[in-house]
Amino acid sequence: MMQLAQPLNFFGFVYREVKQSLVDMETMFQLLKVEAQVKDRPGAPDLLLEGGRIDFRGVRFSYDDDREILHGIDFTVRPGNTVAVVGPSGAGKSTLSRLLFRFYDVSGGAIEIDGQDLREVTQSSLRQAIGIVPQDTVLFNDTIGYNIAYGNPAVETASVERAADLAHIGAFVRALPNGLDTMVGERGLKLSGGEKQRVAIARTILKNPAILLFDEATSALDTQTEREIQANLREVSRGRTTLVIAHRLSTVVEADEILVLEAGRIVERGRHAELLASGGVYATMWQRQQEAQRRTAEAEAEM
Ligand code: ATP
């Protein structure tokens, strides 16, 4: 966060509100007109999207000089595929997504989309290509329609309604007294975490990006919400190149590849069944989580 230190000192109150989540950092830059330290190369062309293939090649990264966080990360997400990153807290999972969005430049190696180094293309075209469903969606004090169309104000109502339906929040919105014109946020209707996430998904469906970054919430969720999120992810990632930063494991079962990150290194990789069979770190994490879920389900049943 070195690069942001100054504006964040000035705007600490905003920072506290928005600190971790990517979309909120994007919003923060826009709201405060803060220019990120990462600059476009003079004359940089726009990203030319083909399938939306992502390549991390030997990526190294440090936030500050004295501690390297990522020590050489190699992986590919093929067009339309889903790769999930799992691993303990502090392993560097969210850092990968911040680098893909180019909040920071890599310290070594390169990240490419469809063969183009992120440092060689305009940031606006890069961010246009990527949709983010963040950990916690912060809603604006405005209508639910505005919140869905955010970033695309000229969009027609019919498209907003369609996106809401695809994100499984359409019926909920129609049941509100003022429909899409209902005010939400701190000074309006309060939405649950799951509903807010569906607003973010509707926003992403409307943006229609080739690449999707799904940053899963860290907080423990009940079994029902967990299942809904899994279904939401399946819906929104269809046909898109998807990188899931997974804090729990249930959303990664169907991924084309799972990367297990520990202290900035990929220590295991493969599909769910392969990793379970190999009996390594992932298998242990999975067993531990299954056990925790069993206890939660028992507690829910007793209530
Ligand atoms: P979690 O599951 O808890 O979200 P994570 O695997 O996503 O963890 P990261 O957020 O990527 O982990 O953090 C990796 C390391 O980088 C951690 O040691 C963290 O303290 C450090 N780090 C994260 N953000 C910054 C920052 N802005 N400045 C300096 N260090 C940072």
Image (cartoon, rainbow, N blue to C red):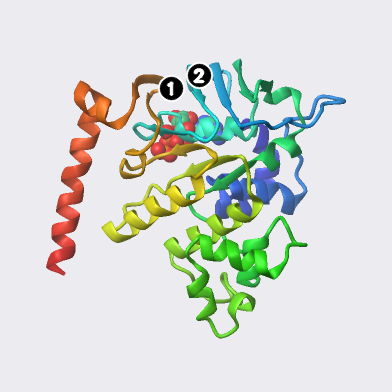
Q: Residue at x 27, y 57 (%)?
A: 223
Q: Which residue is mark 1?
A: 264
Q: Residue at x 67, y 61 (%)?
A: 149
Say whether marks 2 and 1 touch (CB < 8 Å).
yes
Q: Nearer the viewer, residue 7 or 52?
A: 52
Note whether ligand 1 is within 8 Å of mark 2.
no
The location of residue 260, given as percent across then percent down, is 36, 26
Residue 63 in view, yes or no: no
Q: Nearer the viewer, mark 2 or mark 1?
A: 1
**Up-down relation of residue 267 to residue 298 (above or below):** above
Name the image quarter holding the N terminus: top right
The location of residue 214, given as percent across then percent down, is 49, 44
Note whether ligand 1 is within 8 Å of mark 1.
yes
The location of residue 167, given as percent across then percent down, is 50, 60
When asked about the image quadrant of residue 222, the answer is bottom left
Q: Which residue is mark 2?
A: 68
Q: Around disc 1, counting alpha carbons within 10 Å, would you say few (fewer than 14), some (14 to 19), or many (20 or more)?
A: many
Instruction: Measure how far apart labels 2 and 1 are at the Cα level.
Output: 8 Å
When asked about the image quadrant of residue 259, the answer is top left
For marks 2 and 1 on the same chain, the one whose residue lies earlier in the sequence: 2
The amino acid pointed to by label 1 is: Gly
Q: Residue at x 78, y 32 (%)?
A: 46
